[in-house]
Amino acid sequence: MKASTAVQSAIPAATLPVGRRQPRPVPSSVGAGARASHSIIADYVELTKPRIMVLLLITTLAAVLIAASTRPTTGLETLRLVWLTLLGGYFAAGGASALNQYLDRDIDGMMARTRNRPLPAGRLQPRNALVFGLVLTALSVLIFGIGVNYLSAGLALGGNVFYVLVYTGWLKRSTPQNIVIGGLAGAIPPLVGWAAVRNDIELPALLLFAIITLWTPPHFWSLSLMLRRDYTRAGIPMLPVVRGLDKTCWNILMYTVVLSATTVSLWLAGVMGVFYLSVAAALGVAFVVQAALLLRDGSQLRAKSLFVYSNIYLALLFAAMVADRLLALS
């Protein structure tokens, strides 16, 4: 197989540095230039990871609209739930991201992709990021608890606690299965969206949860293939660092096949119609093909292509869910 020649062999887990390390110092001239080109507001917005936020809110919105299509609700009531759920979801995801960057400020300073984030670059104080993350998390719980229901509030809070304490604080630095288990936190938003409307957790919500859980490993492992040197330098035991390229590519392909099959289960369960089925099948085939091509040559270009497609895939898949329900109601 050609994949083994595309990237250097993986570094054994035993050779990885352990413990928290201090971020790489930023030269004063660089820091001054960064502060001059970034406003304080922009830095706080960056703490919320807005690009990731978009995907999370898309999955939340889809769950709200799908749940609303299964029960009689007025247009105004649906709009109220959409507004409050997206607002609460924004604060929850933003708070979790800020707390994640607070805990990861040491390793972020060692990685080229993250060393210019507000904390390792010295544009914001860690204490301010900590307070900001806690305030956003508290606001999300208040919005859900007062404006929606207690179940959605509990799910949002539980997702944040799992992401910050279990994934960021423990799994990320200790096991190559960090993404597999930690991905559960990223799958919470559709549960929150469903609970906001139905005030319970039913089979469709669990299927949405499973889809995102299965999507997360191929998505992040393709990214970690691109950033393997960074993760090695920072001592993060991502799968490509610990198990090597071939093993990672095989895992990506397996998860992609299972993911594609799972998306069809929404149609089999009677939740979605033929429009969704056709879109999900086409997107799934393309995803599997991308994963198979990565397994064949293991190049950085293939890894990047798969990573970019994985973002497009999830957005289009959940957009197809919404369109399918709107077509069913028309």
Image (spheres, rainbow, N blue to C red):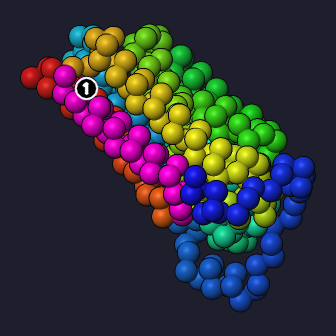
Please say whether residue 10 is visible from this viewpoint. yes
**In the image, what residue occupies the spot 65% across and 44% down?**
247
Q: Is residue 91 toward the left or the right of residue 313 in the image?
A: right
**In the image, what residue occupies the spot 47% across and 36% down?**
256
From the top left corner, tell me how far across and down residue 303 is, in percent: 51, 57
Q: Amino acid at mark 1?
A: Leu
Q: Which residues are magenta?
A: 274-300
The residue labelled by disc 1 is 277
| Residue ranking furthest to the front | 1
- Please name whichever residue, 144 or 198, is drawn nearer the observer in this view of the structure: 198
- Please name whichever residue, 50 or 38, is drawn nearer the observer in this view of the structure: 50
From the top left corner, tell me how far across and down residue 72 is, in percent: 23, 10
From the top left corner, tell me how far across and down residue 276 is, in percent: 24, 28
Q: Quadrant of residue 224?
A: bottom right
**In the image, what residue occupies the spot 73% across and 71% down?**
122
Q: Is residue 288 highlighted in magenta?
A: yes
- Please name whichever residue, 220 or 61, is drawn nearer the observer in this view of the structure: 220
Total label count?
1
Give the answer, above or below, for where 298 lies relative to 34: above
| Residue ranking furthest to the bottom | 29
From the top left corner, tell me how far across and down residue 314 is, in percent: 39, 40
**In the image, what residue occupies the spot 63% across and 78% down?**
35
Dot 1 falls on a residue whose secondary structure is: helix
Q: Is residue 243 toward the left or the right of residue 116 in the image?
A: right
Secondary structure mostly taken by the magenta-highlighted segment of the chain? helix
Name the image quarter holding the C terminus.
top left
Please say whether residue 118 is visible from this viewpoint. no
Q: Is residue 299 toward the left or the right of residue 179 in the image?
A: left
